Image (cartoon, grey):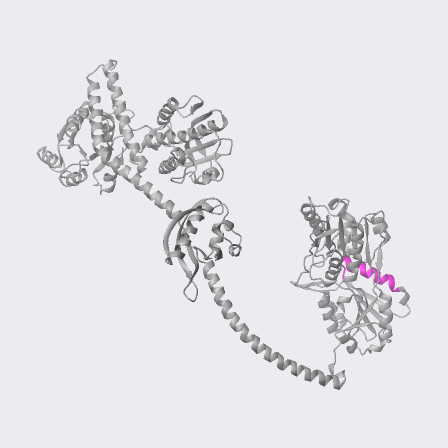
């Protein structure tokens, strides 16, 4: 019963032996140990139990152990805690038998077993002071009582120490200590005329050591095993009795075998192993079908006399005074007691054996040295091959594998590279012969030509079935004589490289589209600007309700739409913020859904719910238009495939609403808390497979390669939304459709004024210098601005503009113009260069720059007097609004892009 640092080995249930043996039913047995692993008494009991149960094959026994650690910790709180723990732990487990050792576990089982282990028989062992009332009415319980022979020990002690008249019983007040003390008291009355006794069971170890130093010479000690905690250290029973033995001149006797040799003389002792074997035999009978009531409780009495040689020697007790059959621990063995002739024969034999052993050791050492060198070389080669990321494998002339490294096995899903040895390609890769055949033909060619082959790129499926590309290098494998005996191959997985090359090619295509779009944008936007402004001027000359005015308004709408198309091409190739403004995106969404509704087949319905009357946010309506088109097209493709498989159509639902994201939901979307516009495009199609949902936004990822899919639709959506400081959330389940929710930050409270909403609200009277190299714009734009009340002077270039400015008079602080509107891309000098010159000639004049190439404007150094940048094509209202802002009205004088 002593604590140690090493726990007993875990029990292992035996299994049926032999290929024909039927599998027996497994029985669950729970063993509740009152103490902790390392407590010697309970460890020996457990070993005895294992010896009986672990070797059973019919029935098979699964033995589970729970240590209650009551030597260190006890009390009602711990007992309740153990009850709660076992109730949770074994809520789904039933046991055929529950075994308990020592009094703490026994009392726990009496109190809680019916609730914790309903119907399970209880087999106990190591229980002291077992009274009839403890077993009253218990037909589910039997076991082994721990009944030690105090009489046999005391009789022996009085015989060995005839002058002793006093007995001191040392123990503690634990559950087991009290029970053992009760057993001791029950066996002492016959000695009342020969001994006086007293019980020390309420002292700490320090107090006991002080007391034993003062015991009278006629006293002897009987030690009950107990655990002692002093400060942060726990003393086992062996350590406690050893301390007492060092401080006491009185002989110490005990009735437990594990205490002999730790400071005690000895006694008639109990052996824990036999105790456990007996209890396990009872449990085995129950498992075999014997009713518990037919197995009576057994009171095991120790029948072994065990003594410590050191204790006998200390108290001068001769071995002749010991009972017949006694065992003595720590007894020295004197080899010189052997017959001298036999002794010298043994010595000579040992010398000869030693010499032979030295000779063998030298030879074995040399051989091992050579083997170690060979093994080290092989180990290094194996380590080198297994840590090379490339696939390495080699074959003989018959195309049979002679070896491979771990990268080869991992690629093809093999458990171990060694499984390929001696096999051919069809045996190693049975399903991939079409792919491996070309590689095998390359092997034959290498052996025929005796020349290596490099950088062969072949497609292979990986072990998980995914397609991959391998770049192979093959070289002839030669023996010592230089003969080709096979081929050595290396292969590199270049799948990612192949994908990157494909993406680079696609990216170059997109770059070409972007370059072409950028080149066309300037000239096309000039044309559209002329059409827009000329149309606006023509409308001023017509009655608003005339047919011609209606026709011109359609021309104006188509022209603006044409400008949007140019921006969409630029956005597709390079998303940007060049056309961002405070805009009501509900119109763009309704326009997109209107186009879609007219193009969808009859079996697919488009439902819209635009809940926000004025959905104002900082955005490019054309890009939002593209987001709606891409998401709805994606939903249509899913429903179209679903229609082919299930024979029914579906519904695409577009919802726009305003919402406030709480902190926890905003955190999940990586957005700040606040108000957002939520655009949801949902369908009731087959949904998105969980295996690919993490890849749907990857560029060039598509599940419709055979149907012309490029894998750019959702990637463009995500790029546009992130460019708007928003996020896209996806919700999908197989068979239940997919839902894409776009969150865009709101602009204020939703009622902010939109750019260009009422261009005529503020009329102008200022003098405007308009600079433009395009003749048609030079003619139409001044007329448009004049319609808004401005006094406009036109100049065809920067040089002419500076000349006009110089003639307009005034000193530098009172120029003749209030604002300059200039084109950016002009021959001779750009709009920014003109603005730089104006900083010197007329530093107080604000400048508005118009351009059809926003990236050229963005990449140039912007002078500080450039207050506004207007993108072509533009109408009069947009230019009028920009001039008002540049003059400090309706938006301040900070530089911005319209």
Answer above or below: position of 105 versus 302.
Answer: above
Residue 174 located within the stretch drawn in magenta: yes
Say if residue 576 shows up in the picture.
no
Q: Which of these two is toward me, 112 or 21?
A: 21
Q: Residue at x 20, y 19 (%)?
A: 538
- What residue appears at the point 69 percent right and 58 percent down from the top-left corner? 36
Image coordinates for residue 796, horizontal then vertical, percent: 13, 32
Above or below for 864 versus 61: above
Task: Residue lying at the far left in this picture: please name it.
Answer: 807
Please say if 450 is above or below 370: above
**What secondary structure characterizes most of the magenta part?**
helix
Residue nearer the viewer, 85 or 368: 368
Q: Is residue 233 left or right of residue 508?
A: right
* Quadrant location of the C terminus in the rendered image: top left
> Does any portion of residue 59 appear in the rendered image?
yes
Q: Which residues are magenta?
A: 172-188
Q: Quadrant of the N terminus?
A: bottom right
Query: Foreground residue, 678 or 565?
Result: 565
* Residue 775, position as x, y percentages in the image: 14, 29
- Out of 245 and 152, give the one closest to the viewer: 152
The reply, left or right, for residue 348 in relation to residue 894 is right
Q: Is residue 305 left or right of residue 740?
A: right
Total marks shown come to 0
> Within the magenta stretch, is there residue 845?
no
Residue 12 locus on image (x, y percent):
69, 55
**Residue 567 occupies quadrant:** top left
Quadrant of residue 167 within the rendered picture: bottom right
Q: x and y percent of residue 71 in the render?
A: 72, 59
């Amino acid at each position: 019963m002593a604590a140690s640092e090493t726990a007993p080995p875990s029990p292992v249930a035996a299994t049926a032996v032999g290929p024909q043996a039927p599998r027996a039913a497994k029985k669950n047995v729970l063993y509740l140990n009152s103490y902790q692993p390392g407590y010697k008494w309970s460890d020996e009991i457990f070993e005895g139990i294992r010896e009986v149960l672990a070797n059973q094959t019919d029935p098979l026994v699964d033995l589970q152990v729970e240590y209650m650690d009551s030597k260190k910790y006890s009390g009602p709180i711990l007992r309740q805690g153990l009850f709660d723990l076992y109730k949770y732990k074994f809520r789904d487990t039933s046991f055929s038998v529950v075994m308990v050792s020592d009094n703490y576990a026994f009392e726990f089982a009496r109190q809680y077993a019916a609730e914790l282990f309903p119907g399970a028989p209880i087999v106990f062992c190591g229980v002291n002071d077992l009274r009839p009332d403890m077993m009253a009415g218990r037909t589910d319980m039997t076991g082994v009582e721990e009944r030690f022979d105090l009489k046999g020990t005391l009789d022996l002690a009085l015989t060995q120490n005839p002058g002793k008249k006093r007995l001191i019983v040392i123990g503690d007040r634990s559950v087991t200590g009290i029970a053992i003390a009760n057993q001791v008291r029950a066996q002492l009355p016959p000695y009342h005329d020969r001994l006086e006794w007293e019980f020390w069971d309420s002292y700490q170890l320090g107090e006991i050591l002080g007391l034993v130093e003062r015991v009278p010479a006629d006293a002897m000690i009987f030690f009950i095993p107990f655990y002692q905690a002093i400060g942060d250290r726990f003393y086992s029973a062996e350590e406690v009795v050893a301390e007492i033995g060092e401080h006491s001149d009185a002989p110490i006797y005990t009735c437990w075998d594990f205490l002999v040799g730790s400071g005690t003389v000895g006694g008639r002792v109990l052996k824990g192993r036999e105790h456990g074997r007996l209890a396990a035999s009872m449990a085995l009978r129950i498992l075999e079908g014997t009713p518990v009531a037919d197995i009576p409780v057994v009171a095991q009495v120790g029948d072994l006399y065990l003594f410590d040689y050191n204790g006998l020697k200390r108290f001068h007790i001769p071995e002749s005074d010991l009972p017949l059959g006694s065992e003595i621990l720590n007894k020295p063995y004197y080899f010189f007691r052997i017959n001298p002739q036999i002794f010298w024969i043994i010595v000579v034999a040992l010398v000869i054996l030693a010499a032979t052993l030295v000779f063998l050791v030298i030879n074995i050492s040399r051989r091992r040295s050579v083997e170690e060198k060979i093994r080290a070389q092989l180990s290094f080669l194996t380590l080198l091959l297994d840590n090379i990321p490339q696939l390495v494998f080699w074959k003989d002339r018959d195309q049979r594998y002679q070896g491979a490294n771990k990268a080869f096995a991992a690629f093809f899903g093999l458990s171990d590279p060694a499984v390929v040895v001696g096999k051919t390609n069809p045996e190693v890769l049975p399903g991939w012969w079409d792919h491996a055949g070309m590689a095998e033909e390359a092997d034959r060619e290498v052996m025929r030509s005796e020349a290596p082959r490099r950088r062969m790129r072949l497609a292979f499926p990986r072990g998980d079935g995914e397609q991959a590309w391998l770049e192979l290098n093959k070289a002839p494998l030669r023996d010592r004589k230089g003969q080709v005996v096979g081929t050595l191959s290396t292969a590199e997985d270049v799948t990612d490289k192949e994908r990157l090359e494909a993406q680079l090619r696609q990216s170059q295509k997109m770059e070409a589209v972007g370059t072409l779009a950028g080149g066309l944008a300037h000239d096309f936007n000039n044309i559209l600007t002329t059409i827009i402004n000329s149309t606006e001027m023509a409308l001023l000359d017509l009655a608003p309700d005339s047919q011609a005015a209606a026709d011109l308004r359609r021309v104006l709408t188509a022209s603006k739409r044409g400008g949007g198309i140019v921006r969409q091409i630029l956005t597709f190739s390079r998303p940007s913020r060049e056309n961002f403004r405070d805009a009501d995106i509900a119109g763009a969404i309704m326009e997109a859904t209107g186009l879609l509704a007219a193009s969808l087949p009859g079996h697919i319905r488009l439902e819209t719910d635009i809940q926000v009357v004025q959905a104002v946010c900082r955005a490019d309506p054309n890009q939002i238009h593209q987001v709606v088109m891409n998401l709805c097209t994606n939903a249509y493709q899913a429903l179209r495939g679903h229609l082919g498989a299930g024979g029914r159509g579906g519904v695409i639902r577009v919802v726009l609403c305003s919402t406030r994201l709480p902190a926890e939901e905003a955190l999940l979307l990586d957005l700040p808390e606040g108000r957002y516009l939520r655009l949801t495009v949902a369908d009731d199609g087959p949904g998105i497979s969980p295996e690919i949902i993490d890849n749907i936004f990857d560029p060039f990822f598509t599940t419709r390669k055979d149907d012309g899919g490029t894998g750019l639709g959702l990637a463009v959506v995500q790029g546009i939304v992130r460019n708007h400081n928003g996020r896209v959330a996806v919700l999908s389940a197989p068979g239940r459709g997919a839902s894409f929710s776009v969150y865009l930050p709101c602009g204020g409270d939703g009622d902010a004024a939109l750019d260009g909403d009422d261009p005529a609200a503020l009329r102008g009277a200022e003098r405007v210098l308009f600079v433009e190299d395009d003749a048609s714009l030079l003619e139409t734009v001044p007329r448009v601005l004049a319609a808004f009340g401005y006094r406009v002077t036109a100049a065809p270039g920067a040089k002419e503009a500076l000349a006009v400015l110089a003639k307009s008079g005034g000193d530098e602080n009172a120029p003749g113009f209030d604002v300059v509107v200039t084109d950016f891309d002009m021959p001779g000098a750009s709009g920014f260069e003109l603005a730089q010159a104006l900083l010197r000639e007329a530093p107080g004049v604000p400048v508005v720059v118009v351009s059809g190439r926003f990236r050229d404007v963005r990449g140039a150094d912007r002078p500080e007097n450039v207050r506004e940048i207007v993108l072509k094509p533009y109408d009069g209202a947009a230019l009028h609004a920009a001039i008002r802002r540049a003059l400090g009205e309706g938006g301040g004088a900070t530089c911005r892009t319209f």
